Structures are given as structure tokens and as C-alpha cells.
Image (cartoon, helix red, strand yellow):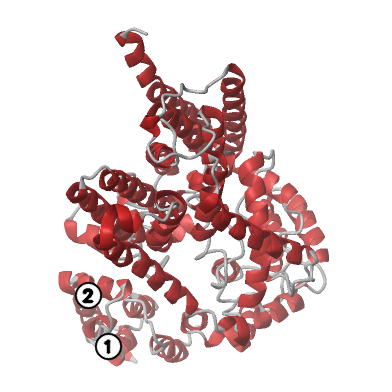
Amino acid sequence: MSRGQTTTRRWLPFVAFAALLAVAWLAYWPGRNGAFLFDDFSNLAPLGDYGRIDTWWKVVAFLTSGFAGPTGRPLALATFLLDARDWPASPEAFKLTNVAIHLLNGALLAGLCAALARALGLARQSARWAAVIAAGLWLLDPFWVSTTLYVVQRMAMLAATFVFAGLWGYAHGRALLAAGRRRAGYAWMSASLLLGTLLATLCKENGALLPLLAWVLEALVFDRCHIAREVGGRAFIVWRWVFIRLPALAVLGYLATFLPGLWTGATAGRDFTPLERLLTETRIVWGYLGDIWLARSHDGGLFHDDIRISTSLLHPPSTLLAALGIVALGVFAIVSRWARHPVVAAAGVAVGFYLAGQVMESTWLQLELAFEHRNYLPAGLMFLPVGIALAGVRSSLVANPEDHASKLDLTPWKIWAAVVLLALFALQTARRADVWGKPFQQALVWAREHPDSPRAQSYLANFWSGVGNQPEAARLLDAALQKHPHSLILLINRAGVACSEGDAPPGLRAALLHAAATARLADNVTQYQFGKLLDGTGQCTALGPDFTADLLAAALRNPQSALPEVRRDLLHRQALAALAAGDVQRAYALDLQALRLPGQPVGARLRFAAEIAASGHPQIALNLLNAIPSPLAHIHGWGMAAMHQRWLAHVGFYQESEAHLRRVLTAEIAAQHQPGSGAAAQ
């Protein structure tokens, strides 16, 4: 073979993967026209909290405003500034940036897969082709549409970006160490793990799993022959403890602090206990695996409130089988360490990596039961055994692939198998992305696929209401209420339809009041929907007189109203109702009570005071400001919320706003006491 032909063949894998990146971009293109969804609004709305973000202090204020996790995820928030610096904004730019990040992740994963294939005994060119197939299948898997086109899940995607990059750098350093380049090897490994973990965690908390995932690769790939001490000496063993095992054990130790919940049964506001969640997750994980591998025609979506809870290993019976299956997968991953065939070894790596990647979000932490994006990182190596099987297989693993001169084993049937699989995944991704680009069709599909989900049925009903088809919305909700008569979300949406039609079905008012007193008001979705209901009942006559007041009273009897964030909102709504009725003293007392609850939002007292002033009572508004100190006066802790407050205190944004409000109130008070004014005459 000529030198030119050799060079061409060497570059073919890179050309092929570039083509797959282009195919992925085209497959996702129809989804750019989709809308913002659910958590997008709460996480992106701070883009407009301080006006257009055009100065550095506003940039820092936005980056420290995160609340989605303990870290605030500032690095992920920073990337949203690439798409918009104000709110509201168009979703298209956000979605296209997400697609670009997905393509970047595919490229990083290809590099990692090539490094792992080499370590498992494949020659360089075979490893490249294995990586093209493995990363290409992951890149085009339709299961990631709900991650890539759901804007806020950029957080999960970016965590994967830095985990893939960190592990690739670690694998490269490990190869350098094996080649005798110790200084360069340690530099690559140390920097990759430290920076990768830090940056990934600042995007989403599961990025902290990087050392645990490195431990999996170390055990199942790089030290599968138990020769680490012989190759690297005692220095490497110490390094491995410091950079891999101790950080991984620290993360596992943190997760273990939540284990007592398995026995206490504390629900933390959910419909299930931690033990029930753990049991249910065994079934959910098998559902995930089916969706990842089978490229099913359904669209999954974001609604999973129709999942049956596992209350024990035998209820439902599939729980026991699912749990035994998970244990079997774990045993297989461990035993694969002694496998001699690279495909079997790669399968063990894929399984071990997946199970380790799920340990944070799919075990006993009291998160919602299921979300497809939780698989985005753990499934990174899922198709590595397929890639190795199609690109080149040796009869046994070898320490140095270059010791063998076997040719690339891409026979025609293997090429066609790879092409068919990739084409199938690409077509399903394009079809699913097209649905995501059409919000009404998306709602129809989700409602059809989740007939027992109150959230899915309510979501579709909102679309029917939005186009003025109230009878269809009412029909849909009434049918869902037959199955879930106590669902507050369904009742809230049915009340909205009743208010639009001017007529409520019998029993709706009583059912709403009962649900308000018993439902999980702390749930984010329920809280948002309940707020929408309260916003719309002011002019509604269909539910009878004093319905808003009765609804608020019922909600305040709810045990979850003891939570400060829930109680504060309810008390403030009562205050607004009192202002509308002209009872300013009652409004003042309620606002005072709301502001004295822990965790007062920074701008709440200014907003409450401005509302009272707008009703014509500047003196009472000033009294409210004087009675409650600013939360910026006494900031505690160093969490992201506290850092956000410290920054706002430093730049003086709210201090200037308060000074301005006080000047206005003082001027209005003085004007009211001028001779001839209404207040003076009284």
C-alpha cells in the first residue's frame, strides 16, 4: 500500500465522525422551533431580574442566582449568556447551543472511547473505528432528544462535557505513564481529574462522580491485570488513593449520610419513602436501558408521575426481578475484569460505568422518580462493546497492541451493520426532534403516551384552553379526574376551564378546597399551578363567592404550609386580597408576618411596601420598611444564596432601590399633610 493510501486510510475515521456530527446537527434541526418548558422559566428568568445584563456586576449577580442544586451551577448559567442577556428571550438560540454542546460531547466521547479501546488491546486504527461507531451511536441515540432540546438540561450536558474531557485526559496520562513518561503522565492525570471534577460539579452536582467513574476505568481497564504497583511503583498507588479513591469515597460517604432515611421513612414532601424510591428505581433503570438500546418509536417526554411505586420487593412482583437483574449486572461488571475477550471486557466497562453513574440520581435521594437526562452521562460507554465488536476483535487481550500486526477487521457485513444502526438512530432522533419542535403536537403525544399522568393530561388541556377549545379541555380533565379525583393539578386546571366557561361542575369547589388542604404544596409543579389558579380566581364567578379567601384559608391548614416558602406566598396573597378590599391594616399585619419568616427573598420587603404605597398609604408602607430589616444587613453562611446576597450588598443595588423608595414615600407623606390635601382635611 502506498504512503498516500496509508495516510488516507488513517484519516478516514475522522472524516466519518465529522459526517456523523453533520448528520446529528441535521437530525436535531427541526427541534430548534420548540418552546421553553417548565424549569426553563424559573432558571432563566433571572436573566431579567436587574434589567439587561450589560455590566459585570449584573453578570456576577446572574451567575450567583442559581438555586437548582447546592452549588448553584454557575458555570452552566454562564453559558446561557451566550444566547440571551435579557428576559423574556427566544428559545431557538438556547436550543441550538445545546445541540452544539451535544456534538462536542460526542467528539470528546469518541476520544475517550478510542483511548479505552487501545487500552483493551485494539490496534490504533481499529480503536479509532471502534470509537467512531461507539460515540456515533451514543451521539445519535434518540433517547437524548429530551435532554438536548430541553434548555435547562444544558446543566446535565455540560457536566458530561467535563467528565468526558477529564476521563479522556486521565486515560491519556495513564497511557503516558505506561510508556514510561512519568512526569507527563502524572501531570495529565492530576490536572484532568482535578479540573474535570471541579468544572463538572459547577455545572451539575453529578459531575462530582468523576473520580468514582475513573475508579471504574482503573479497575476494569487500566489495572485489570493487577500490575499497577509493578508498572507505577508505590508512588502511583499513593497517587491513585489521593486523586481517585479518596475523592470517590468522599462522594459515596456523602450519599451514605442519607441512608438513614431508608428506615425512618421520611418522605421529604414526596409520595414515596426513600426505600420505596430505591426499590422503584430498580424497575426504572431497566426501562432506561430499554430506551437507550432499542430506539423505540415513543417519545417518552418529561412526565413520569404515572409510574407505579414499588412498596416492597413483591409489590409489584417485577421489583424483585429488576433488583436481582441489577445485582447480576454488578456481578458481571466485576467478573469482566478477568475476561480475555475485549468485547466482553468492554461490556463490563459499559455496565460498571453506567451503574456508577446512576448512584447519585437513581438510588435513595428523594428526587423525582425518573428523568431521561439522568442517563446522558452514565450511558457514555454503553456502545463501546458494539464498536469494538464491529471494528476489530482479538482472540485475547494483550498488553501492547502494536505487538500484533492484525489488520482492521471491518468486513462488509460489519460496515453495513454499523451503517444500519446509525441510520436507524438518526431517523428516530430526527422524528423525535420534529415532535419537540411542535409544542402542541408534543403535548398531544405526551398525553397519549401517558394516559395515567395528571401532569400530561393537564399540559394538553392547557393547550386546548389556549386555542379557545374549552369543551375539549373540560372533557380531557373530567376523564382524568375520574382516575385521579384528588389530583390538585387536575383540579386547578379544571377550575381554570370553569372560570373561562363561567360554569363549574358540581363538587369542583369542595374538591379544590379539600385538595388545597392536603396536597403537596411544596412540590415545584404544584406550587406553580396553584399560583396560576390564585392569579386567575379574582374575576372568576363560577366557583362561588369568597372562593379565593376560602382557598387560601384551606391551603394555610395544609401541613406543608409550615414551610416558610409556602407560607410566605400564601400570607402575601392574603395581604393583596386585604388591600383590594381596602383593609390596609390587615394587609400590613399579613405582610409583616410573611417577611418575618426565615429565608426572606432580598427584594420582597421593597415589593410589599411598594404595593401598600400604591394603594395610597405611604406611611404604612414606610412603617413596613422600618419594621423589617433588609436581609442584606445580616447574611449568614457561604452557600451560593449567601454569596449572591453578599454580592448584591457589595454593589448596592437594593440599597439604592430602597433609598429611592424611601424618598418617594417621604415626599408622598409630606404631600398628604399639605394644607388642602385629602389626608390633611381628614
Question: Residue 460 has which mark?
Answer: none
- Please tell me which residue is depicted at 27% across the width and 77% down the height of the picture: 638
Question: Residue 646 has which mark?
Answer: 2
Q: Amino acid at mark 2?
A: Arg
Image quadrant of residue 242?
bottom left
In the rendering, at what x and y percent does residue 506 appear?
82, 71
Disc 2 or disc 1, which is closer to the eye? 2
In the rendering, at what x and y percent does residue 490 appear?
70, 65
- Please tell me which residue is depicted at 39% across the width and 54% down the height of the picture: 159
How many circles with numbers are drawn on the protein? 2
Q: Write down the residue under mark 1.
A: 629
In the rendering, at what x and y percent does residue 21 appear?
43, 29
The disc, 2 or 1, on the residue closer to the chain's N-terminal end is 1
What is the crowding at mark 2: few (fewer than 14 residues within 10 Å), some, or many (at least 20)? many
Q: Is residue 76 left or right of residue 148?
A: left
In the rendering, at what x and y percent does residue 230 appear?
32, 55
* 504 to 176, vertically: above or below: below
- Whether residue 437 can be seen here: no
